[in-house]
Amino acid sequence: MYYGLKNPNRKQEFINRMNQQIKVNENLIKGLETCEPFIRAFNGKVANSKLIKAIYTAENPNNLSYSITEKRGCKGIAIGISDNNHRMYASVEGKTWNYLTSYNCVFLLPTTKPDENSQDRINADEAIKQIEIEKEYLTILIQECKADLQMYDEEITAWEELERQIEAYEQKFSPNLRGTITMSAR
């Protein structure tokens, strides 16, 4: 079994993981876009599971999962979207499956409460602003994944140079001198 830089499949595993993460983030953006018309339709209505049931009636080719929960410490409720079906990708050998650590998003569904005795009602305009913020964040994550894919070889070269420098440092200085500084390669 190979680990780290010695793994001959390291690059392909990284490419598979980044491509899968891009796919999941794009699916989550589509899920956010799916929520928008339903949130607008529920503007001023009580925030409850009927909203999620309505979203489930929409076309859902990626089998995204939607949930609604109270968000502690915030005024309002949160909607969570998960892409459970695409959170895994096959290893290069095809023998095992690896999991992504990021396959869901949660956005605040702001509500209003006209008086003490009434129930929270959806504020669609503010909710759409929250969706736009989440979409921008996911877009940034997609761009970061694409940039990482392009810089993979450069990072490997830089890391190999750093390993050579660490080795030269350890050969030059005694353990007494370098005792307070710890460096190690992956």
Image (cartoon, grey):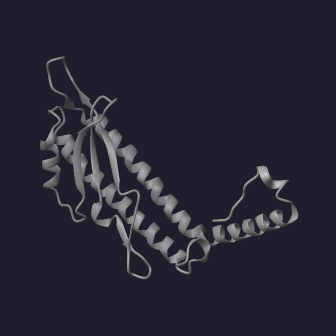
Image position of 122 with respect to 176: above or below: above
* Picture coordinates of residue 43, whole percent (x, y): 19, 35
Q: Is residue 57 or residue 177 the one in the foreground?
A: 177
Instruction: Indicate the quadrant where residue 96 lies.
Output: bottom left
Q: Is residue 21 left or right of residue 115?
A: right
Looking at the rendered image, the quarter that the C terminus falls into is: bottom right
Q: Is residue 43 or residue 21 the one in the foreground?
A: 21
* Picture coordinates of residue 127, whole percent (x, y): 29, 38
Residue furthest top in the image: 116
Instruction: Indicate the quadrant where residue 88 lies.
Output: bottom left
Image position of 114 with respect to 95: above or below: above
Instruction: Indicate the quadrant where residue 122 lies.
Output: top left
| Residue depicted at x 70% and y 67% | 158
Q: Is residue 101 left or right of residue 72?
A: right
* Picture coordinates of residue 17, whole percent (x, y): 45, 68
Q: Is residue 17 or residue 55 the one in the foreground?
A: 17
Q: How many marks?
A: 0
Q: Is residue 112 or residue 124 the one in the foreground?
A: 112
Image position of 14 with respect to 83: above or below: below
Q: Is residue 95 left or right of residue 166?
A: left
| Residue depicted at x 84% and y 54% | 176
Image position of 186 with respect to 111: above or below: below
* Picture coordinates of residue 72, whole percent (x, y): 31, 32
| Residue depicted at x 41% and y 63% | 21
Q: Is residue 31 left or right of residue 149?
A: left
